Amino acid sequence: MSDHLLEIKNLKITVATRRNVLNLVDNLTLAVKKGEILGLVGESGAGKSMTGSAIIGLIEKPVKISGGEIWFKGKRIDQHPDEVRGHEISMIFQDPMMSLNPLWRIGDQLIEVITTHMNISHQDAIKKAKHCLVEVGIDPSRMNAYPHTFSGGMRQRVVIALALAPNPSLVIADEPTTALDVSIQAQILDLLKQICKTRGTSIILITHDMAVISQTTDRVCVMYSGRLAEIGITKEIMAHPQHPYTKGLVASTPQIDASSFEKMLYQIPGSMPALDNIPSGCAFHPRCEHAHDKCRAERPEVLSNRAACWLLDANEGQ
Amino acid sequence: MSFIIANHLTRQYDLSDPWIVRMLTSNKRKQLTAVDDVSFSIDKGTTYALVGESGSGKSTIAKMVVGLLAPSAGAITFDGKMINDETISKADRQRLRRRIQMVFQSPYASLNPRWAVGDILKEPIRAFGLFDSRADQDKRVNELLDQVGLSARDANKYPHEFSGGQRQRISIARALSSQPDVIICDEPTSALDVSVQAQVLNLLKTLQKEFSLTYLFISHDLAVVSTMANKIGVLNEGKLVEEAVPSQLFAKPENPYTKMLIDAVPDFGKV
Amino acid sequence: MSGNAMIRRFLKSDFFYDFTHAPIAVVSFVVIMVIVTCAIFAGFIAPTNPFDPSSLELMNGFTPPMQPNAFTGDVFLMGADDQGRDLFSAILYGLRISLFVGVMAVILAMVLGILLGLTAGYVGGWLDNLIMRFADIQMTFPSILIAMLIHGVARGILPPELRYEMSITVLIVAIGLSEWVPFARTVRGSTMVEKEKEYVAAAQLIGLNRWQIMVRHILPNVLSPVLVIATITFALAIIAEATLSFLGVGAPRTEPSLGTLIRIGQDFLFSGEWWILLFPALTLLALALAVNLFGDWLRDKLNPRLK
Ligand SMILES: Nc1ncnc2c1ncn2[C@@H]1O[C@H](COP(=O)(O)OP(=O)(O)OP(=O)(O)O)[C@@H](O)[C@H]1O
Ligand SMILES: Nc1ncnc2c1ncn2[C@@H]1O[C@H](COP(=O)(O)OP(=O)(O)OP(=O)(O)O)[C@@H](O)[C@H]1O
Ligand SMILES: [Mg+2]
Ligand SMILES: [Mg+2]
């Protein structure tokens, strides 16, 4: 077997509305290696959360997976995601209160998760729960506290502890820091990095913030309109983005720079198309200044050596 | 010359229980000081930015500057006149209002979903009596839409027909419609995607040059602030802990909180 | 927008599509429409005018449905009552009164409820407390009791010669005043949500006063749940009218509403003249059921969270 923990092949997620069928995720192929942090970046509506939900099997009607395969540790899981959900793959959401029961002490919630997924005694479960809290930097003496007595950042730590408790090999973190202040965001991102290093857990980090991607991930996958635009090593993509959309994303992200207020920011014209109005050919072509006829007619795919963009072929030919 | 001066602004919120509960439990009154003795001044035609984390009192200050909220102590003067002065006449107050407008954070909640865009833009024009005839008002609406990069056809559409970035443009057009001198921007881009954020920030800059507008720009994002501000004030728990021009603030922050805030911004590994 | 464009937009809307794909909604809507049309055009559809005493033939009393009368040979679709009145005509004319009372009572309750709810929600403070505590107190009594109370008070105040003429108006006021609370509560709740939104702050910034903000900005945004409550209250109002008339404090015998007809009918139920009770009761049942079913569908449609 390869060193791929998770492989997604040609994933397609659709929803049928009254007038037409919308492609929320369209022909997405990607792989997650053992022990890496893979970033999934894109603007609102790009299909990032849908991809995450598909992996862990949380797609609900009327949305459905209508094509492609998801393989996890050599097993195909898109048919029976509940076999891995929770203990092999777990998920962290943007809003910590979505994963926490406000009426339960956090210790009890941890023990509950541990005993459902592991075959150990209650005593051992308590020990393990304490250990999990220490790992995310929460004083284990707060086992008996209720979630509302924690601040937003601490709650997110508890959620991370809950996600890690059954020793999953993959954690999907869907915008885990979007609702938090920058100072707390930095702590949580550090925590995720540290967990990935010490435990060897793979993490899929979903975010819309290129700066977060740049700071946290090993590899990054850029999505646009439900499609893959570009995938590769974060450092390389940040330094030399290939796809014009990635270029635009990188360039339009504001940076701390004392002289920049005299200049204009780089801006991509227009906005992401509505799902029922995705342009022909390359979905990005109406916003791309270099688009030519082929971009309008034919849809580019990501190849092993380049992003999903026809311009890259043209350049090679020159 | 300082255009807006905030002098020892303080605002408290009463978080006490209802008096009957206080009587029964003998709890004391609880006051939250959301803004604590904040002073700053903004020069004409420049951008003053307030940064701070959630709950640091940024929106409270914004509301006091536009006159939606009265300070508990301290005062704000704008072009030599007191804001929130109870003694001035109705007409004078309306004249003041025209000159200070605001752009809000939420692209969804800041436009009345039942009103067509044209009517949203015409409302301030009518309220301040800027153009009397219907034709002039329509012309002005078209001009405003054009200034923010939308088309005259959009006047008949409703807010839900626009994307988040376009709605923020409508919000900006509404603020411009009274021909103000000052616009308070309370996190105008924090609900937007990066590529759209860049468009809106650039638009704000262009308009500032064109109409020599003065901005009070509020944000929690230091990177955004650094692209917009002539001067930055850092708020922490209602107190202004540091104030400096950007070059100085980012090069050698003096306050430990400012330093922590700058360090926490994810660094961008761009070459 | 021109009327035509609005209709075209409506026919293409998701709302209309969902309506045509919900059999219960369509059926109940058709039932309501048929009943309402029959009531409006009662004058053309009904074979006789049951309010005209001169047209009554006492010999026709107690004629069973679809059977010729032994003396006069007249045939009645739904039979005749004790005074020889054609029941079918009486029901059509009775519906007219019932529907009129229902619609007017709902309008009264709605206007009152919206006004009070909007004020309570927007102004807040002691005024809010006053209005809502009053609503709480009123809600502890069954609304039919309130209606009877108001009815009784009105009768006491009105001079005897007006009592008869005003009886329908009194009925409307009594029912309307007993049903405003749900409107006020809902509108107050939505108003409190809406007033925190930034478009309201924007309106304050240009110096609009409270009244302008309430009416022009907030009111249009709190109306959709009102529509749902209005349909359900309409069903309640019709039943309340029937109940009051049944108890003898509603529409007079000379201008019988559905409730009056049912009251008359129950006198004869055990003597074998079942039709005098059955047909008015069935009509009331069909109407109330259809309005309720339609209201339920509307509620699910307009507010999926309530499901
Ligand atoms: N039940 C549904 N019916 C129709 N469209 C849907 C449905 N659920 C989701 N979508 C659409 O699917 C698209 C992808 O959604 P997704 O949540 O994956 O986006 P995202 O990339 O996570 O964006 P965000 O940054 O806003 O979280 C969105 O445009 C959304 O509107
Ligand atoms: N109407 C109110 N009543 C009571 N407390 C309030 C009220 N409005 C704000 N506060 C409190 O005042 C403090 C400052 O609030 P403010 O909205 O000014 O913060 P902010 O800096 O704008 O934060 P954010 O970034 O979350 O918008 C907070 O602790 C908040 O809870
Ligand atoms: Mg998402
Ligand atoms: Mg705020």
Image (tube, coloured by chain):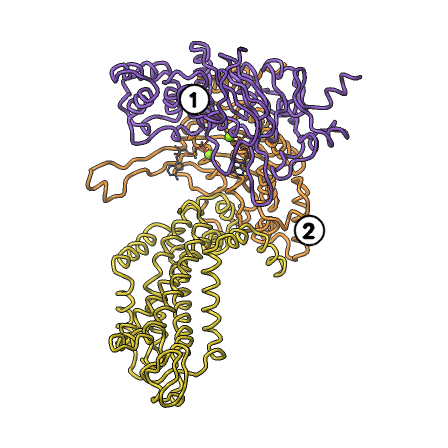
Chain colours: A purple, B orange, C yellow
Of residues A82 and B218, which is closer to you in this image?
A: A82
Q: Residue at x 60, y 46 (%)?
A: B178
The circle on residue A84 is: 1
> Is residue A300 visible to us here?
yes
Answer above or below: position of A232 versus B63: above
Image location (x, y in percent) of residue C283: 38, 69
Give whichever of B9, A5 is nearer the camera. Answer: A5
Left or right of C276? Residue B158 is right
Chain containing mark 2: B
Left or right placement of residue A281 versus residue A168 in this view: right
Q: Which residue is mark 2?
A: B139
- Tag 1 secondary structure: loop
Q: Is residue C138 left or right of residue B233?
A: left
Residue C151 percent across, percent down from the top left: 29, 71
- Say few, some or many: other residues with alpha carbon within 10 Å of mark 1 (under 14 / 14 to 19 / 20 or more): some
Along the viewing direction, whichever of A119 and C123 lies nearer the viewer: A119
What's the amino acid at mark 1? Val
Residue at x 51% of width, y 50% of height: C207
Q: Quadrant of the C terminus of chain A?
A: top right
Q: Nearer the viewer, mark 1 or mark 2?
A: 1
The answer to whether A20 appears left or right of C217 in the picture is: right
> Looking at the image, is B263 positioned above or below residue A283?
above
